[in-house]
Image (spheres, coloured by chain):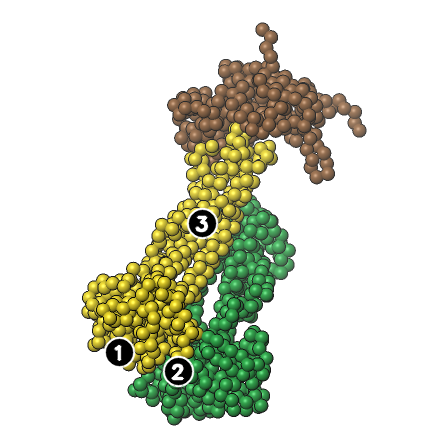
């Protein structure tokens, strides 16, 4: 039934061209802002998020508010490995440098090759892995990072900020892990350049097959509760999320801004639809006299509101996609991901439904006789 | 005592384009109106009565011909000059939606005075006397929504009067009213002409209203005639 | 020239429509004022921190002080650098351990910034004054910056727990809006022990005079013995605050865009108003009110609505800014709306008014009289 009414809905949307265009623009601007913000956040946090499907745990320093500042004694690598339920444990020293004019974030992980391999299953060229094991100054670079920095396998590269001079012996190909945007170096070397002798940032843990990760995590923390540095063990995914949250302390703030943006747009859209309904009181009366049930009238107005909002959303999303696809944005690392698109669509639908609800209810409940007289 | 006509129009033409068609509601009109005269203009709807009225009142400019009202040569005046002219010399009464809904009767009547540099005290005086002429003094502080149709029109007439204009132009003043109220409105207009020496030009399709005027002229196909067009049509050969 | 009475009352007519426009503007102004206030407070906080004669030494390449490690052994080297000021024979070099800790309060963890200092600190940080009590000494004592004390609701005599230790508040610090107001100062060695940190984070140095600074910085940067880098305190804090300040400016920019959205909505309302009052406009023009008068009247209507929205928005913004936001990076829990924010917010409201009302008002003015009366 409603499908047959689509032509009527469409005509009503364009009844007042200027008003519809203005509303469209309003929604478009809001969606553009939302999408752009989300993309910026996505871009900045992508190197951290793709933790992979393995159920790994991260043991970090409990007292640190800033997760990235976590420091543990290197001896924890063995202590954690000894906890029942732990299949393998690998101590990682992490480092972060911001390089170049486009502020590329280079995440570095200093690892012990054998122990790391036990925990983190990586698909790698065996020759590359051997070279990594053999040379204390070797580095394995994730394919995304490699491309971003314009490096090649075999290059001698320098990350000045971290005082690293390494030789790229292999690339980490695409396999759905965060390492694709990271650089793996030898822990012993990184400890020297960062003056972090005897220290690691966290311990990466692979639980025994069949063991519940939460149980193993609890066991680890209990075992180390009385040690020099109290620990907190979480899933690797949770750790990544914590890094993001610290990294982008203002995400909450921006989310609030986003919500308010949607709210204001809602008001604007509701206003516009309400005006449209008011103009059509007589027409609505005729429809009802013809036999249109209130439910159908409600659906018509809501449909109108939705169409308008979604067109605006499409406009905003399109604009965002264009902006993000541009050279400048890509260099800055902005990414338009599917969840962001979904969110933009969702916001448009929300604006359309919520904005059109009150006018739709009013239209549905208008008293036919009054409407025909042009009042109400 | 030969008086000069207060309104003098010669060869007025006004053309409109409606899509592809060209319409000429005023097609070569000459008109003289004497001071203090009560003139009724009649004709079927769409015959150009309102257009002619707009031209006389300086609301619109003719495409050809000239028109003089008092000492003003309207055809030679620009937009700003016409505004000033209307403010000082013309009083308007329309069929509906005359009054500004958010202002009271008194405030509506006072409106034109604010365009002329009239002191507050004098404004009050003039509004009061205008209210008295139309017998609306006791309803002065009501909003248009609180007045009946007839009362609204009376306030509109008071507003038309308040600047002591040279001519009063009424476009279908009885159009929306019941018989009694309509009669009262025309009474006032007639009194303005007879007792206050105001020139009143009224457009109407109501024959009873037109009867009260000093002179009736008919608009037929863009031109003014003296006889009722219905009579004229009866004489036309069938095509 | 159209009486103000008319403008006022017309505004009061369509109550719901008016309310929505006003609300829209109010919200936009509210966020803008808060974001703008946060932004400028932050900028001021980071820009004023760091006296012109101070130099900060940290680990080369460390992104922030917290990630910086300098070996304790370098203290003697730093103290004997050429250009370091002295007082009573003591070099004005303050070694520091800077950490973000989790403070246990009311059963939840709150993020706090902690600076471990030594006895030389009061001599180096001359802009930091004691607002109450005394400087922290051994015995797990802490001095709180007034902003963080405010945020946590702590006063002299209270205790606070972080790094597995209970610290007693023995003093309150007043740093005049600088970042130190957000920090908790404790004894460096005790903090190092509690947090198992073997190195310092950084040094803050007072130079003999500003002329000596460039040479001092170069000496540290060129030095081969320790992987340390030096910069003026002002530069150091500007860099640290970079991210936060950027975020704050981003917030302001977004609120501006939101305001434009509100402007579009306002435009809609005004167009509807003009359309609904066509005959009215015709009558006014017939009476002799000129185009300019009509234009001004409608523009004024729009401006009035927006000013009202702006006033409400400012009130809302004041309330919002007083909400205690638990973000350790914010300069203080209260971000006061100063004169600058008020002026800018009003300008924004007026801007929206002109944007939203301009074109419709123009349309109203350009309406040919005869058409309007039809």
Tell me how far mark 2 sits from mark 1, CA to CA.
20 Å
Side of A371 relative to A236 (left or right)? right
Q: Which hue belongs to chain C?
A: yellow
Q: In the image, which lettered chain appears green?
A: A
Tell me how far mark 1 sits from mark 3, CA to CA.
51 Å
The residue at 54%/53% (across/down) is A23
Residue in the foreground of this view, choosing between C175 and A24: C175
Q: Which residue is mark 3?
A: C348
For discs 2 and 1, the disc positioned in front in the rendered view: 2
Q: The C terminus of chain C appears in which quarter of the rendering?
A: top right
Q: Residues within 10 Å of mark 2 (few under 14, many from 20)?
A: many
Q: Residues within 10 Å of mark 3 (few under 14, many from 20)?
A: many
Instruction: Please indicate, yes or no, whether residue C173 appears anywhere in the rendered image.
Output: yes
Q: Which residue is mark 2?
A: A196
Q: Secondary structure at mark 2?
A: loop
Q: In the image, which lettered chain appears brown?
A: B
Which corner quadrant of the image does residue C109 belong to? bottom left
Chain letter belonging to callout 1: C
Chain letter belonging to callout 2: A
Q: Secondary structure at mark 1?
A: helix
Given contact means CB atoms under 8 Å apart, are the residues at marks 1 and 3 in contact?
no
Side of C213 relative to C187 (left or right)? right
Side of C108 relative to C15 (left or right)? left
Residue in the foreground of this view, choosing between A129 and A61: A129
The residue at 34%/89% (across/down) is A223
Chain letter belonging to callout 3: C
């Amino acid at each position: 039934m409603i499908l047959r009414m689509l032509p009527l809905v469409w005509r009503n949307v364009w009844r007042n061209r200027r008003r519809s265009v203005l509303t469209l623009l309003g929604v478009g601007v809001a969606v553009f802002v939302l999408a752009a913000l989300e993309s910026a956040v996505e871009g900045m946090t992508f190197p951290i998020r793709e933790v992979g499907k393995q159920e790994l745990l991260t043991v970090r320093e409990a007292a640190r508010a800033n997760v990235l500042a976590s420091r543990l004694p290197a001896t924890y690598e063995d202590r954690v490995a000894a906890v029942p339920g732990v299949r393998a444990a690998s101590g990682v020293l992490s480092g972060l440098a911001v390089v170049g004019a486009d502020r590329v974030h280079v995440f570095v992980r200093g690892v012990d090759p054998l122990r790391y391999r036990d925990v983190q299953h990586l698909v790698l060229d065996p020759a590359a892995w051997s070279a990594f094991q053999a040379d204390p100054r070797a580095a394995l670079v994730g394919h995304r990072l490699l491309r971003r920095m314009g490096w090649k396998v075999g290059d001698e590269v320098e990350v000045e900020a971290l005082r690293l001079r390494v030789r790229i012996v292999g690339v980490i190909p695409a396999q759905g892990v965060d390492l694709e945007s990271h650089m793996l170096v030898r822990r012993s070397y990184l400890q020297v350049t960062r003056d972090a002798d005897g220290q690691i940032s966290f311990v990466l843990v692979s639980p025994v097959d069949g063991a519940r990760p939460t149980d193993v995590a609890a066991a680890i923390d209990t075992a180390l509760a009385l040690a020099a540095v109290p620990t907190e063990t979480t899933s690797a995914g949770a750790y990544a999320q914590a890094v993001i949250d610290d990294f982008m302390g203002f995400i909450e703030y921006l989310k609030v801004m986003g919500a308010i943006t949607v709210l204001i747009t809602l008001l604007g859209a509701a206003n516009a639809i309400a005006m449209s309904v008011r103009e059509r009181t007589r027409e609505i009366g005729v429809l009802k006299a013809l036999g249109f049930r209130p439910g159908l009238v409600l659906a018509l107005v809501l449909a109108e509101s939705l169409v308008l909002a979604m067109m605006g959303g499409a406009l905003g999303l399109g604009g965002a996609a264009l902006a993000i696809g541009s050279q400048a944005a890509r260099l800055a690392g902005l990414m338009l991901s599917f969840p962001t698109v979904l969110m933009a669509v969702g916001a448009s639908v929300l604006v359309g439904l919520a904005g059109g609800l009150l006018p739709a209810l009013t239209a549905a409940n208008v008293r036919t006789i009054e409407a025909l007289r042009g009042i109400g | 005592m030969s008086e000069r006509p207060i309104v003098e129009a010669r060869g007025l033409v006004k053309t409109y384009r409606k899509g592809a068609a060209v319409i000429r509601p005023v097609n070569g009109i000459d008109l003289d109106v004497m001071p203090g005269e009560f003139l009724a203009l009649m004709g079927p709807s769409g015959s150009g009565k309102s257009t002619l009225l707009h031209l006389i009142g300086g609301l619109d400019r003719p495409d050809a011909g000239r028109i003089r009202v008092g000492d003003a040569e309207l055809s030679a005046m620009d937009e700003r000059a016409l505004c000033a002219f209307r403010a000082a010399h013309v009083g308007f009464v329309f069929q509906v939606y005359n009054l500004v809904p958010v202002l009271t009767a008194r405030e509506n009547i006072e409106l034109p005075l604010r365009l002329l540099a009239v002191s507050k005290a004098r404004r009050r005086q003039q509004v009061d006397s205008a209210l008295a002429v139309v017998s609306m003094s006791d309803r002065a502080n009501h909003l248009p929504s609180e007045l009946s149709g007839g009362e609204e029109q009376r306030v509109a007439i008071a507003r038309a009067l308040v600047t002591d204009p040279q001519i009063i132009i009424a476009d279908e003043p009885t159009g929306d009213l019941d018989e009694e109220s309509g009669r009262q409105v025309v009474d006032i207009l007639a009194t303005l002409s007879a007792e206050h020496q105001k020139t009143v030009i009224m457009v109407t399709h109501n024959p009873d209203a037109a009867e009260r005027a000093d002179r009736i002229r008919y608009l037929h196909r863009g031109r003014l005639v003296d006889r009722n067009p219905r009579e004229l049509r009866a004489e036309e050969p069938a095509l | 020239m159209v009486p103000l009475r008319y403008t006022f009352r017309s505004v009061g007519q369509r109550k719901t429509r008016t309310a929505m426009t006003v609300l829209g503007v109010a919200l936009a102004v509210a966020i803008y004022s808060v974001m703008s206030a946060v932004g400028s407070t932050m900028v001021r906080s980071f820009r004023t921190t760091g006296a012109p004669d101070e130099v900060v030494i940290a680990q080369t390449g460390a992104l922030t002080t917290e990630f910086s490690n300098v070996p304790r052994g370098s203290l003697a080297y730093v103290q004997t650098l050429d250009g370091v000021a002295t007082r009573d024979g003591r070099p004005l070099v303050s070694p520091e351990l800077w950490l973000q800790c989790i403070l246990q309060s009311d059963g939840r963890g709150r993020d706090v910034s902690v600076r471990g200092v030594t006895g030389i600190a009061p001599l180096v940080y001359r802009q930091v004054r004691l607002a109450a009590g005394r400087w922290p000494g051994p015995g797990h004592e802490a001095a709180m910056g007034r902003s963080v004390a405010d945020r946590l609701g702590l006063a002299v005599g209270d205790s606070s727990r972080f790094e597995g230790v209970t610290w007693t508040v023995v003093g309150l610090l007043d740093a005049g809006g600088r970042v130190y107001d957000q920090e908790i100062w404790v004894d460096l060695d005790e903090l190092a022990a509690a947090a198992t940190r073997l190195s310092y984070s950084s040094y803050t140095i007072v130079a003999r005079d500003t002329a000596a600074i460039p040479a001092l910085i170069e000496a540290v940067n060129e030095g081969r013995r320790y992987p340390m880098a030096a910069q003026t305190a002002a530069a150091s804090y500007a860099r640290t605050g970079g991210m936060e300040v950027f975020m704050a400016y981003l917030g302001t920019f977004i609120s501006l865009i939101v305001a434009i959205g509100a402007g579009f909505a306002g435009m809609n309302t005004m167009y509807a108003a003009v359309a609904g009052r066509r005959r009215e406009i015709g009558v006014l023009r017939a009476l002799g009110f000129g185009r300019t008068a009509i234009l001004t009247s409608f523009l004024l209507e729009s401006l009035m609505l927006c000013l009202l929205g702006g006033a409400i928005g400012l009130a809302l913004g004041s309330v919002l800014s007083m909400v205690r936001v638990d973000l350790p990076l914010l300069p203080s829990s209260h971000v006061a709306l100063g004169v600058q924010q008020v002026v800018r917010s009003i300008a924004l409201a007026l801007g929206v008014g002109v944007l939203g009302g301009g074109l419709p008002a123009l349309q109203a003015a350009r309406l040919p009289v005869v058409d309007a009366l039809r």
